Amino acid sequence: MKARFSWRCFGVLVLACASVRCQSQSGVHPSGIQSEVQPTTPGSCLPSTDYETEGYSIRNATIDDPWHFLMTFGAGHDAASQTAASLRGRPYKSAEVRQARNEIEKQRFLPAEINVSLTGIANCSDKQLDVIFHIFSVQISPVLSSTFEFRQLENTDPQKAGGSSLSGRYLRITPRAGYDQTDKLFGGAAIESEWPQAAIPVDSFSFDGVASSAMHSLATSLAGHYDSASNWLGHAEWRLDFENASLPTGRANLEHGSLALGLSGQLHPLAGVVPRFGLTIDGGNQHSGFAARDLAPNTVPGSSFGAAKFYFGVTAHPRHQALTASYGLELGSTSADFRQDWRKHIGDIAYESWWPVADHRLFEVEQRLTAGRIQTLRVVPVGEKFFGGNAEQPFVPGDAWKIRSNPVIRSISANRFYRTSTGAGGDRFLSYNLTAAITAWRTPIVPSELTTDPEFTQKLDGTIVSATSLLQVTYASDDRHFRDLLPLLPQAAANLDQLKAAVTAAQASAPSSLETAFDVCRTTIKSSSNYVKKAQKAKPVSAYGYVQELLPDGIAALAAVVSACGGDLNSALKDPAIRSSSSDVDAVAHQLQTGFALIDQEAASAKAAADMGYVKRTLDIILKEVNIASISPVFVFDAAHIGPAGAGPYTGTRYGTGGGVRFSLASTASFTAGYSWNVTRHAGEAPGAVFFSFGIRNLLH
Amino acid sequence: MPKAAAAVKQDIVGIHVKFTLNTPDGLRRVVFELEKDTQGNDVQWKITFQLFDRDRKTDPFGDAIVDLEVDVDTKLNKKAEVMADKGMTPKQAAFAVGPAADTAKDSASGDATTDEAKSAIQTTLNK
């Protein structure tokens, strides 16, 4: 299915804009409850004031929640705002404020790894004060946040980038409508559903369909995924896709029906770069309205087909940059015996960079260079050849990893850039696209009152450190030296049992003055035995904590046994069995300690820091750069070549340039519109084309 | 009695930091919460500890098998503050997902007392 630049439901955007404007002008939530944070008077509240005893009353109580805008457009119940509102006008009571905070957290804390809430008192004057509940929840995948596609998510769906929409179960319906010179007026819908993975490893379904008098395009898929924080494979996805499409080219339609099974995976970042790979097996039919005389030799208007697509690449998302480089190879056949009839090679590099030029204002530059080549070994359906224009065609439809596989030039309508010296459809292309934009107006997601509050930033940093520490323990427990010392635990348990038996035997004939020493010895043995047995049963990451407690890194439980039994007790008893058993415990303790010391903590720490580096960076972007809504002027430049080229209308190279405006309404709409002139216009071509990129999200979520 | 402190734009009287630690095998989830409430000069820290366990990754976690609230000994207030500000150290994280979690689980099954469980959880601060 082709990704289209087109009008889609402009009316909804207008409504959404109206809603945002209403909110920003009045400070009133659509529910009718005032819930925006009021401006604070500098330096009006004295720390350590007992506001309850001093008889303050609550002038206003508000919630400061960066994900509040979800409530504006979603179906979320705003009980939290009502709870805050109920405090207004009441005497300040610490217990009531605490209870209100608990209620608000129940509503607004998300099922995320990081949740921070701060209760602030502001505007203390005339024995009145304002209560502000700051709420922040976020969860970011260390693996996925390293990708080029994650940058798109930060811009267009920040609550998803921040993990705030990861409920694990949802149904989302998005209406689609639009107009394009090639496609005509079209309409349709996209449906996405996700549920927790159960016995069958499938956890999402999607359907996307649009149709007009000139075209139709339907795509549906079932997919599953896997994530791991510690295995070599950080993320994997598998999917079953069905597609049926009839796409106009201005002269004849390209028709396509196929079923595809795909698998893709990505590794953990290596020096900031994420390697990834994929494989798709595809089969079906391709037909067209082209006559044989319109086509190059060995090109057929239609046939059944089977194809295997192999693709790999790297992606990186360092600070203020996002890069993806991909190579795809398609081996195709028109016959059931899967002989190679054609080979398609695609190379695609996309690079985005952006610079903050002021608070929550960015200068953004997006560039993309794509090249393709088809080697016809026997025969190739025309639908496999390259058709360019202002619609992008993905190499693997439905995959979140987007590899562009056709020449995109925004000054020519969709699929109308295909004439070559040998016939319809190119067998080679090269295209370059440049988009530059600067934020002219914006509403930040996280207000500066929160991002500049040292208490908030400190607590948030603390939660990141906690997550990093757990990752470090996870990696350390994966270290081979730790795994090697686990087989010593049964020996440690046996030595402790032997010592316990020796101590019990010695006590029968021991003087009563040593009773306390016996008690201390038995207690230390019991404590150590407990740790050893728990460590034996536990998974490595939990066992790590027990082993740590046995050694000087923790409470040195084994050393305490040796000291209490072999030292304090046996210095008086001189019992050879206790001496021997205590020495055995000491020996195994040293073996454990030696193995534990060999764990490469630096490597574990570095891996954890690398994983969380992306999380920190993404949090920073959400806090300092992402906007709920923004408007940016846009400049575009495109150059595209299709071949084989010849003279006259078949020279094959076009340039387009123009400008427009980008409007982003995070979580709801992203809209870029403009006009691009066909600078090197050929006979039969329009002087240019209007380009649109417009998506609506989460309408019913 | 109020201190002779400079007035501030916003006086933070409540802090709640909630870490959710999921083990990579997906079988255990530890929720560790630190809450600070201030009333005048009185500061109270509370630790909430929840443990979720499941046999298979495909099963839902369901209700917490352990749900404990511990009022932090005022002598440990400073350490609680440090943990909220600076996060858990690797030693604290290892203790939280291992011994502290298991002791809390044992208290739910009667193999340890509630006091032992609360003590183990509070011990996390001392690591």
Image: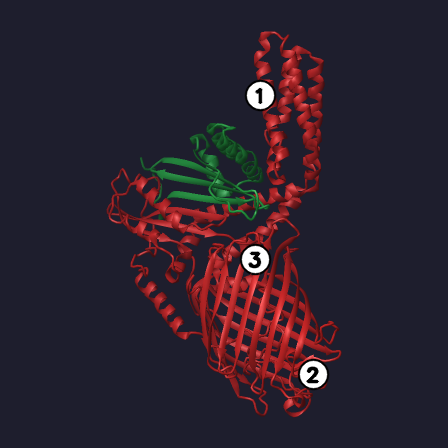
Query: Between disc 3 and disc 2, whose residue precedes?
Result: 3
Label 2: which residue?
Answer: A299
Q: Which amino acid does label 2 sit on?
A: Thr
Secondary element at image label 3:
loop
Indicate the chain coloured red by its letter: A
In the image, is residue A289 above or below residue A306?
Answer: below
Judge by depth and name the residue closer to the eye, A57 or A440: A57
Label 3: which residue?
Answer: A202
Indicate the chain coloured green by its letter: B
Secondary element at image label 2:
strand
Gap between marks 3 and 1, in whole Å? 51 Å
Query: Between disc 2 and disc 1, whose residue precedes?
Result: 2
In what quadrant of the picture does the C terminus of chain A appear? Answer: bottom left
Q: x, y (%) of residue A340?
A: 74, 74
Gap between marks 2 and 1, in whole Å? 85 Å
Q: What residue type is labelled 3?
A: Val
Q: Which residue is drawn at 38% across and 59% down?
A: A75
